[in-house]
Image (cartoon, rainbow, N blue to C red):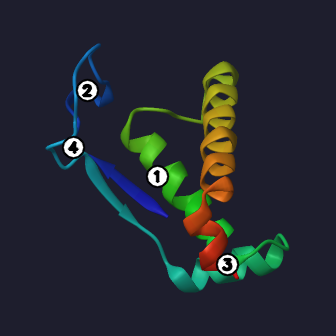
Amino acid sequence: MISFSYIENNEKKENESFADEVMGDIIISLEKAQEEAEMISCGFYERLFALIIHGILHILGYDHTGDPNEARKMRYREKKLLNHVRSHKLYKQLIE
């Protein structure tokens, strides 16, 4: 997974909305996502959504390299967002 942010200085100012803007690009190899899913014994769609969430957080300026506190914050947000996706009825329909 590779992500490219188009957000200046990689940070959102308070009350600023990106709803009408392209924030960045995320490139994911579906073959690699499938390999990783098999390697860690999870479903393909779970791995795919985890990679999408990871890329979105990078685009928004989160980082998991360097500062351990920042890495912890990013992992927390990843888990929280992935749990939200997994609990959604459309996701449940997708994996049936």
Q: How many marks?
A: 4
Label 1 secondary element: helix
Q: Mark 4 falls on what kind of element?
A: loop
Residues under numbered marks 3 and 4 in contact, where contact means CB atoms less than 8 Å apart: no
Quick one: label 3 or label 2, which is nearer the N terminus?
2
Residue 55: image tag: 1
Residue 77 % position (x, y): 61, 35
Q: Write the residue at 43% across / 60% down.
A: 2
Q: Quadrant of residue 47?
A: bottom right
29 shown above or below 70:
below
Q: Amino acid at mark 2?
A: Asn
* Marker disc for residue 6: 4
- On screen, residue 30 above or below 54: below
Q: To which residue does mark 2 refer?
A: 9
Tag 4 near tag 1, CB within 8 Å: no
Which residue was labeled with disc 3? Answer: 95
Instruction: Identify the amino acid type marked 4.
Output: Tyr
**x%, y% of residue 74?**
60, 33
Amino acid at circle 3:
Ile
Give the CA separation, mark 1 to mark 3.
Answer: 22 Å
- Marks 2 and 4 close (CB-CB < 8 Å): no
Q: Which of 65/69 is in front?
A: 69
